[in-house]
Image: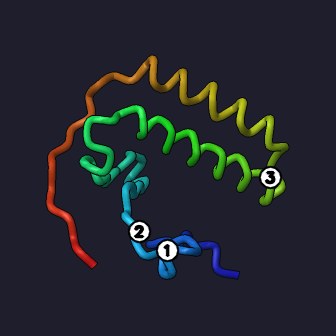
Amino acid sequence: MDDELPVELDPPDGVEESELAVEVLRAWIGDGSLLVSLNSSAFGDHVADWGRLLAEVGHHVAKAAVLNGYMEEDEAQAALREAFTNSFETSSGSMSGQLKGQTKH
């Protein structure tokens, strides 16, 4: 069995069949740091939509924890909520970034 993590994940089921599908977020851990590429204009000035998206991602992570046999879904959701709140409140704000172009497929 190969223990290496994949370099790039496959697109989720349903993307190929969708009439309209837009990639909004990619994230990596590189040398211990979070590296993010996002479609910053995907929701325009509706920043709350990003909050809903992050919550949905959290539900997927909790479900994956269950499917992997790590813990129960309510435990995973509680751990995610606590980590999100703590990390959001203690964020140093030292992140950097810039608006970059996008690749059309």
- For image coordinates 84% across by 43% down, the residue present is 72
Farthest front residue? 19
Q: Which residue lies under the disc numbered 1?
A: 15
Callout 1 secondary element? loop
Please provide percent x and percent y for residue 57: 56, 48
Q: Is residue 67 left or right of residue 21?
A: right
Please provide percent x and percent y for residue 43: 32, 45
Q: CA distance from mark 2 to mark 1?
A: 6 Å
Q: Which residue lies under the disc numbered 3?
A: 66
Which image quarter: residue 86?
A: top right
Quadrant occupied by the C terminus: bottom left
What amino acid does circle 3 point to? Val
State which tag comes first along the sequence, 3 or 1. Answer: 1
Q: CA distance from mark 3 to mark 1?
A: 24 Å
Label number found at residue 21: 2
Which image quarter: residue 25?
A: bottom left
Q: Are marks 2 and 1 in contact (CB under 8 Å)?
A: yes
